[in-house]
Image (cartoon, rainbow, N blue to C red):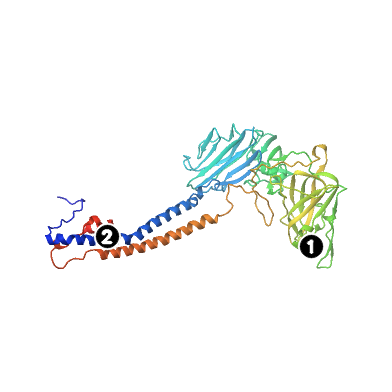
Amino acid sequence: MGFGAGPRLRPVPAARSAAEEAARPGQRSLCARLGEAERARLAPGGAMVAGARGLLALLLVVSAPLRLQAGELGDGCGHIVTYQDSGTMTSKNYPGTYPNHTVCEKTIRVPKGKRLILRLGDLDIESQTCASDYLLFTTNSDQYGPYCGSMPVPKELLLNTNEVTIRFESGSHISGRGFLLTYASSDHPDLITCLERANHYLKPEYSKFCPAGCRDIAGDISGNLVDGYRDTSVLCKAAIHAGIIADELGGQISVLQLKGISRYEGILANGVLSKDGSLSDKRFLFTSDGCSRSLSLEPDTQIRTTWQWVSEMGEQLHWSPGQAQLQDQDLSWASGDSSKNRRQREWLETDLGEKKKITGIMTTGSTQSNFNFYVKSFVMKFKNSNSKWRTYKGIANNKEKVFQGNSNFRDPVRNNFIPPIVARYVRVVPQTWHQRIALNVELFGCQITQDNDSLVWRKTSPNTVSSTKREDEIITSSIPSEEIPTGINVTTVVIPLVLLALLVAGMGIFAALRKRKEIHMDQLRPRKQTVGSRSSIPLPDTSRLSLPSAMIMKRR
């Protein structure tokens, strides 16, 4: 007979005498009373167990949003700019590695009656099975994808609807840029992405449509509006730099390819910094309406306000507005007061002699190394002869537009007005500056014609999202997406922590009560007899004991 697990055998008590049987009812009554007392003792512990379980369940429910926070809709979205009929969208951190366990879901649409065009500029998702990492497009009637890994992906999708939901989901991975896509309505079949470069095209002349939102997408440009751009430059960012299109709107560009030059000079313009470039075989220029000549050189242009300053050497320095023209090599115009409490009282006003179309402005600081003065940001005001001053506003948000100014006293910065200003009088109103307000200004534009004798302000799409970057003390304006969290929700963090503390305290109380129960059970156990046989030890009736007591008695 071998050893094995089997039912535990219980000792069978020996036959009892009549006296023993007579005494047994009293013993049963005593055991019953002990069982009731034991149940009363255990009741608080049982309640504590139930309370602890309730706290744990409540903690799990409340903390569920925190556990799912990595998978919330929108937390995997990156750069998003949308306007009425075009836009740009990327995964988070693009072109860096997208994060683990994120979800990006966004519904985009174009005006009703139009079809939606999607173009994928880049797709780099590590998964080969699309089980946890994928990109998916869903309409009311169709589904495109999921796409991932090395599977073939269409560069362009022409949908039969004006609306689509884009879903990007990620699990655990090591590498992958994620995605970049652009979209537009079917009115723009020549849509390109923000990554297209001029050397991707061989034709000497061509026209393409750039979507809204390409300014902040990674990609270098070299050159400027006057000399042209190196053919390795990304097209849409170069078009924003040149002032051909506004980043908030996108738009049509017309490109002319020419023979390259030996050197390309960079400049900061419209929030985009172009770099100096070396010799290239080809370069490209943007064709435009030609309304970009200098207005500052025209004879009827006048600039107002003046003051003078005595230097440490005793020289009288005249910072007159007549020296504020960019072509002058002398001192620029500078404010007579450097204190910031007078910022709203200082401006540089230009009288153009008659109403003109103004398409851009170029500014520098003092241009003198021993006077490190320059304006960091400014707003524009304008009016005609018998009208009030108006503030130039942004297209997307219809708020006062703050233009990026200079970052040193020397290098010029250009900004374009899209749509243009049509006015006779123009004011540059500094908002932030370094040490003292100092400006050299050049205005660009042309004479008024019947086609451009008014300002056209386009209405903003209700789901417009503007993506901007803050520079050193530069005032910027943005509309945050409702789907992208802008901060930490304190409530979702504090409540689970409080519940966790209560749970820990409850578990401590429960442990103390359980310890007391064990001590009490030791006191209830029958003591071993020193005289008499085993059969003389009375056994209680376990049917009337509480469960823990019954189990203990059975073991004996």
Q: Which residue is mark 1?
A: 337
Identify the residue at image location x=28%, y=63%. 521
Q: Residue lying farthest right?
A: 299
Horizontal side of residue 289 vs 125, given as left or right: right
- What type is the residue that disc 2 sits on? Gly
| Residue that appears at 24% across and 63% down | 525
Callout in the foreground (2, 1): 2
Dot placed on the residue nearer the N-terminal end, 2 or 1: 2
Taking depth in this image into account, of 126 and 280 the one nearest to the observer is 126
Task: State whether residue 193 appears in this view.
Answer: yes
Residue position for label 2: 35
Q: Tag on residue 418?
A: none
Q: Is residue 366 visible?
A: no
Left or right, 217 with respect to 494, comes to right
Name which residue lies at 46% across and 51% down. 61
Which sits in the foreground, 547 or 479?
A: 547
Q: CA distance from mark 2 to mark 1?
A: 93 Å
